[in-house]
Structures are given as structure tokens and as C-alpha cells.
């Protein structure tokens, strides 16, 4: 006889962290505690256990309170379970739905970490052989598939890029695009550096996040959000949040360029002055061009040093580690000196960091499925693609509807109402501005 029970937090986290296939930071104790503090959600750490109290499956259920004493539940990245075991999935669904009904939930949403297909850097596709069976299992359990969305309409991204870190580092690098390799080399040539930050560096991280988001015309979270996330994931020994800061120290960069300048001058000095051959003339022209470029760069970074001080953080990334995986959860970049390509070297450094720690899967946490040229997110997709990971498509969201009437109101009518209110507010603002402009003209 199987039963669903509230698990002790440590036992729950141990099971999730060590699950061979479905371990995910969004099902972790840390994410549950963070969601309680910053998202106003109530976490439930549930496990399906047998008569010997052995945990067979688990789920972090996040409860969102709604008006009229209603709620809904969301299990980010679904159940931590072997989805190939139909009987276990059905029993888990039955017990979770009963739990949800006892709390007057109108639906339960899951978005399992189940890969539909993946495409490697050579554009070779691999389909999940168990996909159709798992899809039909969830359907037979009563879940309703929410469709194959292409952008960021869902709670979590339906597409991502993942790098297999069990490969040799040389092989991983070989999958990088040619421009990515060149840009990493350029950042190294300028003697930029990537360091691991501490809590005090969260201010720099937040500043770069605001710059990045303002370029995309939205602001998502305040500084306290990131600080709380950092503290909770580092306060639990089973999870970790790490800041990587890509910096340029102008004095070091200028010194590296001056060293390069000396090397070029030395190469020029050994060329014969008289009777240069055709190849020697071509070499002299190339070295002279390189020398002029280096001199221009030296002057540019001297001016930058005067303007910005000796050191500037140009890139800041937050990496989440949990189980055998790591996720690039947030990345912020400065508006200046993008030609240093510090963002590229920062990515490369945390790829190496994760591999050295024995992490097996490196997830860039989100991209798009709509690859049309007019998609504003296409640039993000193309950037992540350059690091040679597998382009992964997940199964998508599923809803188990426990109250059809309230589900219809919440998912259909409420969004329409909110859209009307937003449009009305926008129109009222425009009318008010028009009135003000008319008064000024009169």
C-alpha cells in the first residue's frame, strides 16, 4: 500500500538531489524555501512511500493562494520519479490530486524535465524513445497537455542548451563556434580576468542585471530577490549559488598590449631594411597594421581608465549547482567595452569550474523554439548556441483540472479582464498626456 506523506526536509532533499535522472534545483528544498519567502508560495515536500517507508517518488508542490479560499498547485519540473513506470506515475498522480482537492485547489500544474528531442552542434537530432509512452501515460492519468509553446509563455523555459561535461574539455571547446573561440582568445589577450565573487559583490551583479534588463525593456527583480536567493542556496549544504565576475583591470590590459607592441616592434626590427622581398614587404605591412591597431587600443584603454577608474566589472553571472547539474540562472552585462568579450570568457570559466567540480550537465537555462528572424529573442538563442551545447526541447506544461468552472475563470476570463484593465490604464494615461499637451499649446 503506497501513501503520500509530508517528508522531513532533509530526507526530501536527499532523495531529490540523488535521483539519477530527475534531480533538479527547481525541486530542491532551497527552491521551496526561496519560493516561500520571495514568491509568497507555500511549499509542501511530499513523498510517495511504501509500507517500509521507502521513498519511491517525491514532489515539491508550491501552493498559490487565490480568492474565495481557492488555490492552485505548481510542481516545477514535475515529479521526481521514474516516468517509465506507468503504475508509479499513476499512483503518484492519484495521491497528489487527492491532496490538492483537500486544499480546494482548482488545478495542479507540472512541467516535467522530460526531453522530447535534442539537436547537437552538428545539427543531428536525437528523439527520446520513451517520449510517446510517457506522453500517453500522463494523458491517461488525467493531465491535459498545454501545447508546444515556442517562446517564454510557460512557467519555465521549454527549450534550453545543455553541455555534457563528462566529455574531455578539449572536446567541449571543439564544439564552440569559431567566433566564440576567437572572442575568448581576445579577452585573454587583453588580460581580462574572471573571479568568483562573494555576497558583497551582489551589488555589482544587480547593477549589471538592471543594465541588461533595461536594454530588453523590462525589469524583473529587485536587489533583495537576488540576495535572498544567494543566501538560501548557500545556506543549504546540498545546493550552491556562485557568482562569476568578469573584470577588466585597465593597468593590466595596457601592460599586456604594451608587451604585444614590443613583440611586434621586435619582429619589425629583424626584417632587412633594404631589398625587401615581396613576402617580406607583405609581412612588414601586416606588422605595421598590427602595431597601429595595438597603439590605438592602448590609447582607448588609457582613456577608459581615466573615465571609469582602474577596474570595472563588465559581466556577472549567477550559477546554481544542485546534484549532478549546474544552471546559468542569471547573467548581466555592462553597456560598455563589449569588444573585450569578457562575457564569453566568463561563460568559459564557469564551464571549466563546473567540469572540475565533477558536475555532469551544464544547463544554460532557457532559449526559444521560434527561430524566425523577427523574434526579438533570436540574439539570445544564437549567443547560447555558440557554446556548442545540445539544443533540448522539453515536453511542456500539463494541467490536472480539479475544478473546471474556476479553472475556466482563472485561465480564460481573468487574463482577458487583466488585459482590459491594462489597456484602459494605458488609454487613460495617453488621454491625460494629450490634455496636458493641449493645455501647453493653448
Image (cartoon, rainbow, N blue to C red):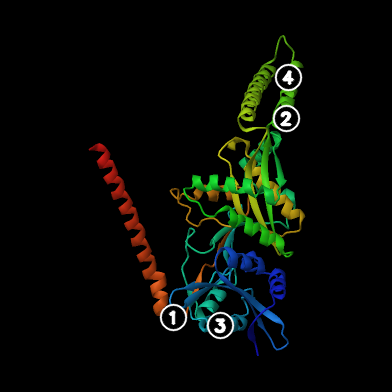
Q: Position of residue 221 (x, y in %)?
A: 54, 55
Q: Residue furthest bottom?
A: 1
Few, some or many residues within 10 Å of mark 3 (<14, 14–19, 20+): some
What is the spatial separation of the Cα atoms under label 4 and label 1, in whole angstroms?
A: 78 Å
**Residue at screen point 65% across, 24% down:** 290
Q: Position of residue 12 (x, y in %)?
A: 69, 74
Q: 7 or 111: nearer the eye?
A: 7
| For residue 332, above or below residue 39 | above
Q: Are marks 4 and 2 in contact (CB under 8 Å)?
A: no
What is the spatial separation of the Cα atoms under label 4 and label 2, in whole angstroms?
A: 14 Å
Q: Please tell me how many numbered marks the rendered image carries.
A: 4
The residue indicated by pointer 3 is 99
Q: Earlier in the sequence, mark 4 or mark 3?
A: 3
Q: Earlier in the sequence, mark 2 or mark 1?
A: 2
Q: Position of residue 83 (x, y in %)?
A: 61, 75
Q: Position of residue 173 (x, y in %)?
A: 69, 47
- Image side of residue 49 versus residue 213, left or right: right
Q: Which mark is residue 403?
A: 1
Task: State which mark lies toward you, 4 or 2.
Answer: 2
Looking at the rendered image, the quarter that the N terminus falls into is bottom right
Residue 127 shows in this picture:
no
Q: Which mark is residue 265?
A: 4
The residue indicated by pointer 2 is 256
Q: Residue furthest left?
A: 442
**Residue at screen point 58% across, 52% down:** 223
What is the spatial separation of the Cα atoms under label 4 and label 3, in whole angstroms?
A: 76 Å
Secondary structure under tag 2 reads: helix
Q: Residue furthest top?
A: 274
Amino acid at each position: 500500500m503506497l501513501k503520500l506523506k509530508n517528508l522531513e526536509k532533509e530526507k526530501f532533499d536527499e532523495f531529490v538531489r540523488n535521483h539519477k535522472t530527475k534531480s533538479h534545483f527547481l525541486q530542491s528544498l532551497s527552491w521551496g524555501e526561496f519560493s516561500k519567502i520571495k514568491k509568497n508560495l507555500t511549499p509542501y515536500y511530499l513523498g510517495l512511500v511504501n509500507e517500509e517507508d521507502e521513498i519511491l517518488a517525491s514532489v515539491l508542490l508550491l501552493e498559490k493562494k487565490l480568492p474565495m479560499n481557492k488555490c492552485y498547485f505548481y510542481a516545477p519540473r514535475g515529479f521526481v520519479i521514474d516516468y517509465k513506470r506507468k503504475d508509479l506515475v499513476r499512483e503518484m498522480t492519484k495521491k497528489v490530486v487527492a491532496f490538492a482537492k483537500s486544499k480546494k485547489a482548482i488545478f495542479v500544474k507540472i512541467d516535467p524535465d522530460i526531453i522530447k528531442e535534442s539537436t547537437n552542434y552538428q545539427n543531428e537530432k536525437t528523439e527520446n524513445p520513451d517520449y510517446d509512452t510517457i506522453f500517453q501515460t500522463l494523458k491517461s492519468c488525467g493531465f491535459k497537455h498545454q501545447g508546444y509553446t515556442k517562446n517564454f509563455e510557460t512557467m519555465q523555459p521549454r527549450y534550453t542548451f545543455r553541455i555534457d561535461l563528462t566529455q574531455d574539455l578539449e572536446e567541449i571547446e571543439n564544439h564552440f563556434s569559431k567566433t566564440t573561440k576567437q572572442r575568448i582568445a581576445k579577452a585573454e589577450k587583453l588580460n581580462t580576468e574572471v573571479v568568483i565573487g562573494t555576497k558583497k559583490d551582489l551589488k555589482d551583479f544587480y547593477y549589471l542585471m538592471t543594465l541588461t534588463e533595461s536594454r530588453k525593456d523590462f525589469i524583473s527583480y529587485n536587489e533583495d530577490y537576488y540576495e535572498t536567493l544567494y543566501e538560501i542556496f548557500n545556506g543549504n549544504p546540498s545546493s550552491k549559488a556562485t557568482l562569476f565576475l568578469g573584470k577588466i583591470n585597465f593597468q593590466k590590459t595596457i601592460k599586456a598590449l604594451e608587451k604585444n607592441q614590443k613583440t611586434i616592434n621586435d619582429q619589425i626590427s629583424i626584417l632587412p631594411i633594404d631589398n625587401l622581398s615581396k613576402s617580406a614587404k607583405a609581412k612588414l605591412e601586416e606588422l605595421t597594421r598590427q602595431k597601429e591597431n595595438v597603439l590605438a587600443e592602448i590609447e582607448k584603454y588609457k582613456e577608459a581608465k581615466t573615465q571609469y577608474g582602474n577596474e570595472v566589472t563588465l559581466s556577472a553571472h549567477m550559477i546554481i549547482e544542485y546534484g549532478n547539474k549546474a544552471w546559468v540562472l542569471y547573467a548581466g552585462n555592462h553597456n560598455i567595452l563589449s569588444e573585450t568579450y569578457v562575457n564569453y570568457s566568463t561563460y568559459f570559466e564557469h564551464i571549466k569550474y563546473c567540469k572540475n567540480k565533477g558536475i555532469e550537465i551544464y544547463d544554460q537555462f532557457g532559449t526559444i523554439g521560434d527561430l524566425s528572424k523577427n523574434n526579438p529573442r533570436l540574439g539570445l538563442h544564437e549567443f547560447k548556441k555558440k557554446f556548442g551545447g545540445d539544443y533540448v526541447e522539453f515536453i511542456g506544461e500539463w494541467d490536472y483540472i480539479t475544478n473546471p468552472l474556476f479553472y475556466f475563470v482563472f485561465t480564460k476570463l481573468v487574463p482577458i479582464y487583466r488585459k482590459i484593465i491594462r489597456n484602459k490604464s494605458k488609454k487613460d494615461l495617453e488621454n491625460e498626456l494629450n490634455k496636458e499637451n493641449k493645455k501647453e499649446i493653448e
